[in-house]
Image (cartoon, rainbow, N blue to C red):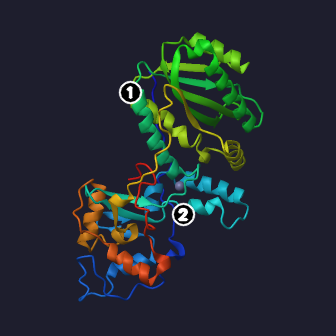
Amino acid sequence: MTNFTTTQSSSLLMDDPQGPGYPARPPSFPYEGCSDYPSSEYGIPANLESLVHTSETKTPDGEIGTYRHHRAQNCVDELAAVRQVYETLDAGNPNGKHLQLDGCRKNAWFARQKDTGIVKVFSSACRLRWCPMCAKSKQAYITRSTSEWLKTVGYPKLLTLTILHTELPLSEQIDNLYGYFKRLRKRKAFSKKVDGGVWFFQVKISKIDGLWHPHLHCLISGLSIAHSTIKRIWKEVSFTSEIVDIRSIKDKDNAARHVARYAARPSELINLDIDKRLELVEAMHGRRLVGTWGNARSVSLKPPKSDDHEDWESVGSWSIVTGLLENDARARKIFNAWKNSLELPAGVTCKPVDDFIAEEYIWGSERPPPGEYQHTFFEDN
Ligand SMILES: [Zn+2]
């Protein structure tokens, strides 16, 4: 039986200053909207000053950073490794991808679904392939859609196909691997037994010889197929490699989770030196990392674009809500509704504070643009 495991990287918090996106001085105004501060009695709430001056906010339970801090907690080192690659490839471009990466999950806001009172956090997303935060979101979606498909098929199996290690450029090796795989699926001895499947590309550096180790994991359905048969066909189509593995799947959810880790990123860059990182990112440019065939063609690999933005309303930016937690009942209600999946009653909002800041300091706004109240990524909460 396959022992599926998942790995996580460092939990160190990254350094992520808000930069110039916040006002240099706290707003000097009586504000309305958050119930603990009646506008006629209070000027600047004490913690609003610290809020607009720092990227860190505090709660009664401890520290809460920016939303980006929250999302990046388990991938700080990977994020740094990815940034180094994009910065190198950007070669001084002032609008390069490393800056898109820096903006990922930076602006975030709480939104309430008008009908149900459900609260979610929506945010900016860079959607760069190697961004670990965007990859995690994509992985969650593919895990779910793949699990759903696995549950509909009998006797699913995990097939792993590898090629011999060589010193050929990685790009060439991937061309070969994908080509062999295409030929495998066309072989009658294979296609009459295997109804379809979902494939995922993964690549590592071999600990034995230091060479690239590209391979494919496939979740397949169909009749039983002998290891010796697969081995023979793979050798015929790849000319050299007999290295295949096939095993039954006992835990379908775990199997989907295991392979979907590669669906968005075929490798963690932190494990590679900078030259290998660059070679990998360039070799994978424009290539698919995951695909379906046969009876798995219906498996969705990309979240459909949501058109439910009319159903959601902003109830405050991440900075404002988390910054007011200690002193504002509405902020606490919003935060707790999000954290504990509770219903938030209509009318509980910190949006007026955001509105004020947006009016006074346009460049300090951390709010969705009009029409952006929608799911831009999957299971980011
Ligand atoms: Zn991202």
> Is residue 345 shown above or below 356?
above
User: Residue 169 or 76: which is nearer the viewer?
Assistant: 169
Residue 193 percent coordinates (x, y) = 53, 14
Q: Which residue is mark 2?
A: 103
Q: Residues within 10 Å of mark 1 (few under 14, many from 20)?
A: few
Residue in the picture at 70% in, 15% down: 236
Mark 2 / mark 1, whichever is N-terminal = 2
Residue 287 quadrant: top right
Numbered disc 1: secondary structure? loop
Q: Amino acid at mark 2?
A: Gly
Horizontal and vertical percent for residue 180? 68, 24
> Which label belongs to residue 151?
1
Q: Which mark is residue 264?
A: none
Q: Nearer the viewer, residue 265 or 344?
A: 344
Measured in 3D between alpha carbons, the distance from the residue under mark 2 to the one under mark 1, in whole angstroms, is 38 Å
Residue 121: where, in percent of width, then height? 38, 59
The image quarter containing residue 91 is bottom right
Q: Is residue 121 above or below residue 296?
A: below
Could you classify mark 2 by the number of other residues whose Cα lies within 10 Å: few (under 14), some (14-19), or many (20 or more)? some
Q: Quadrant of the N terminus?
A: top left
Above or below residue 160? Residue 316 is: below
Q: Position of residue 195 (x, y in %)?
A: 51, 20
What amino acid is at disc 1? Lys
On the question of residue 219 being in view, the answer is no
- Judged from the image, the secondary structure of the residue bearing numbered disc 2 is loop
Tell me if residue 311 can be seen. yes
**In the image, 173: left or right of 66?**
right
The reply, left or right, for residue 206 in relation to residue 365 is: right
Asked if the beta carbon under badge 2 is closer than 8 A to the nearest atom of ligand 1, the reply is no
